[in-house]
Structures are given as structure tokens and as C-alpha cells.
Amino acid sequence: MMKFTISSIFFNVFLIITLVFQTHASKINYRSNKYKALFIFGDSFLDAGNNNYINTTSLDQANFLPYGETYFKFPTGRFSDGRLISDFIAEYANIPLVPPFLQPGYNQYYNGVNFASGGAGALVETFQGSVIPFKTQARNFKKVIAWLRHKLGSSDSKTLLTNAVYMFSIGSNDYLSPILTNSNVLKYYSHSEYVSMVVGNFTSTIKEIHKSGARKFAILNLPPLGCLPGTRRIQSQGKNSCLEELSSLASIHNQALYVALLKLEKQLRGFKFTLYDLNSDITQMINHPLKYGLKEGKSACCGSGPFRGKYSCGGKRGEKHFELCHKPNEHLFWDSYHLTENAYKQLAARMWDHTGNSHTIGNYIISDFFQ
Ligand SMILES: *[C@@H]1O[C@H](CO)[C@@H](O)[C@H](O)[C@H]1NC(C)=O
Ligand SMILES: *[C@@H]1O[C@H](CO)[C@@H](O)[C@H](O)[C@H]1NC(C)=O
């Protein structure tokens, strides 16, 4: 009997220790789960509605129908019929939909926030005055850091920032804007000089963000810029080809971007990156839409003129008339410059995927970053 009691005491002590340990462990789990954050920077490929709240024109906004019609049933400001790559990445990572930084009344940053702005480039001159430039996005990030430090203290906020994933899509507008605004900048600079300037500014802002405590960088490279309905249309006059100058600039940029990231990996403490080759995947989808369950890889769903490349989707950009397809899901392009939700979903899945044929460059895949 005595023996039984002693062993029972031991058992109880053991049980209590186990319970205390488990409670502690689950507290840690709960906290590290709360610390899972996604910070988003860049242009209209990732803007979830920041431009709804700035003084700009409808050219840089998508807060009217039919934008958003497929998934949200109302226009959120996303340049698509539904969700974006970053929305799917958040979903795969079990993070709630990441809201725009400028959304009024929103100030819970534990799961990250979205700083991206349609039309933004790495250069401050790009669509200056109508967008939130990349450098300003990084400055807004510092405001969020101050908020986190205030709420969590310096040690916990530092942990959050170290574990967080930072996603980027920037550069397309630096090349589109000179072409679309007939600026002379591409005559003044050689292509390689101009690319160095864009990548140089990208790099210096990345360094700032790293200095603030970011470590895990997930970057999308530039799509084939001359093969979007809006740029194909400039080229066209009946022809079916891409605007070579723009596609070539995107390729030169993408090579320079990769070299710059390898350099940052050597220079910056703890810097990790994954570079998703969006360019290859979109090129494949343009050339072989059927392989991706799409019927149309060249013309947009929403717009007017050749390839529906005229940027008139929604009828609010100085032109009331526009055409709209019945099944956005069958199209790669939603409007003259942006993709459908179906396309973004497939791209996000390929970015996330681990099975070997993923088009990711670098030692990591974005899913590794959320482990
Ligand atoms: C918005 O921008 C326009 C054109 O740049 C300017 O005339 C107007 O004063 C601005 N409005 C505000 C509220 O800043
Ligand atoms: C950044 O861009 C500006 C033009 O906006 C340019 O003068 C400057 O040289 C660029 N910086 C780097 C590091 O390339």
C-alpha cells in the first residue's frame, strides 16, 4: 500500500512536471504562431488596395467593377478579377488575408501588412506623384516596426521581424513608364545603364529593409513585359508579336537582379532569398495556355482594341467602352497589364511547390521560410 502511494506520488509529480512543461510549450507554440507574418512590397501585381487611399488617377486604381468580380464580388483595389499571388501565399501559410497598410482603422500588424502600390517602381521618378514609391514603402515599414516594438517590446518584435517573410514585386513600371509616357530616358541611358540604376535602387532599399531586421526575402522577377496585351498592342498593327525592346529589358533586369541577390547574400548577415522565375512561367502560359487549363494566353478578358490591350477595363480611364469576357478563368490576362485570379493561383502554387519542377532560383522556396 505504502509502496503504491509513493510510486503514485512520484507519478503525480511526474504528471505535474509534464503538464507544466506542456503548458509552457504550447504557450511558445501559440506565440510563435502569432509571430507568423508576411510583409508585402511592390507594384500592382501585389497591391491589395493601398492606391484606394492616395490621391491618384484611375490609371493607378482598380477600385471599380468588374475588378474583384470573381472572388470578392466587389472591387477591393486589387488589379485582377480576384485574389493575387500574395493572397494565395498567405493562405498556404495559414495567415489571414494581409490588409493594405493605408486601410483606415486597421492597425494590427502581427501577421504582416501590405505596402504595395500599383504603378510603383524602384525609381522615385516612375509615375511620380501618382504612386507610393518603393523607398516610401520601406519608410512605411519602419512605422510598423515602431508600432510592433511598442506593443511587443524590443526582443519579441525583433523575433517577429526575423521570422517574417518579405515578398517583393518591383521593377516592371520602371520600364513600362518610359514607353507608355513617351519619355526620352531610354534614349538618354543605354539599356544596361538604366537597368543598373533600377537594380541599384532596388538593392539599396532591400539593404534598408534588412537593416530593420528582415531576413527572409521572396522576390518575383519581371514578367515578359513586351508580351502583355497592353504592350503587344503598341507593337501590333496586325502583327502577333511582342514588343521586343520591353521583353529584352525585362530579361536584362532579371539577370542583373539575380546577380545582385547573390551579392547581397554574401554581404548581408543572415540574408536569405528565394527568386521566383515568374518570367518563365508566364512565358510558358502565353505560349501553351492549354497546358494550364486556359483557352486564351494573349488577349485580355477585360479591355478594348487589339488583344483588349487598351487599358479601358471598367470604363473609368477616360474611355467608357470596354469588352468583358464571360469566363475570366479561361484567360491568362485579366486586363491589359494584369493576370486573372486563375493565373495568379497557378503561379502561387508553383512558387510554393517543392516537387522539383518549380521555377525558383536560390537555395530556398518560399514555403521553407514559413516552416
Ligand atoms: C490631388 O492631385 C491633384 C492633381 O495632382 C491636385 O490638383 C489636388 O489638389 C490633389 N488633392 C489633394 C487632396 O491633395
Ligand atoms: C537610384 O536612382 C536614381 C534616379 O532616381 C539615380 O540617380 C541613382 O544613381 C540610383 N542609385 C543607384 C544606387 O543606382
Image (tube, helix red, strand yellow):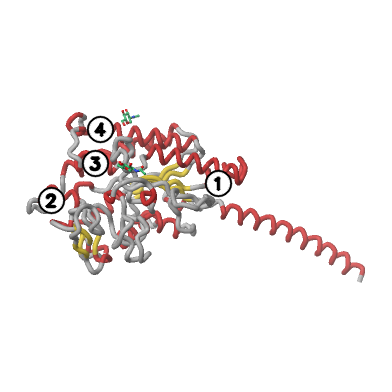
- Residue 243 position in % (x across, y down): 15, 46
Q: CA distance from mark 1 to mark 4?
A: 36 Å
Q: CA distance from mark 1 to mark 2?
A: 47 Å
In the image, residue 313 above or below residue 265: below
- Residue 33 position in % (x across, y down): 56, 55
Which amino acid, mark 3?
Ser
Question: Label 4 CB, ligand 2: below 8 Å?
Answer: no
Q: CA distance from mark 4 to mark 2?
A: 24 Å
Q: Residue at x 37, y 54 (%)?
A: 351
Q: CA distance from mark 3 to mark 1?
A: 36 Å
Q: For mark 4, what is the residue?
A: 194
- Residue 37 position in % (x across, y down): 50, 51
Residue situated in front as seen by the camera: 28 or 69: 69
Q: Are marks 3 and 1 in contact (CB under 8 Å)?
A: no
Q: Are marks 1 and 2 in contact (CB under 8 Å)?
A: no
Query: What secondary structure is found at the residue carrying circle 4?
Result: helix
Answer with mark 1 or mark 4, whichever residue precedes in sequence: 1
* Residue 230 visible to the viewer: yes
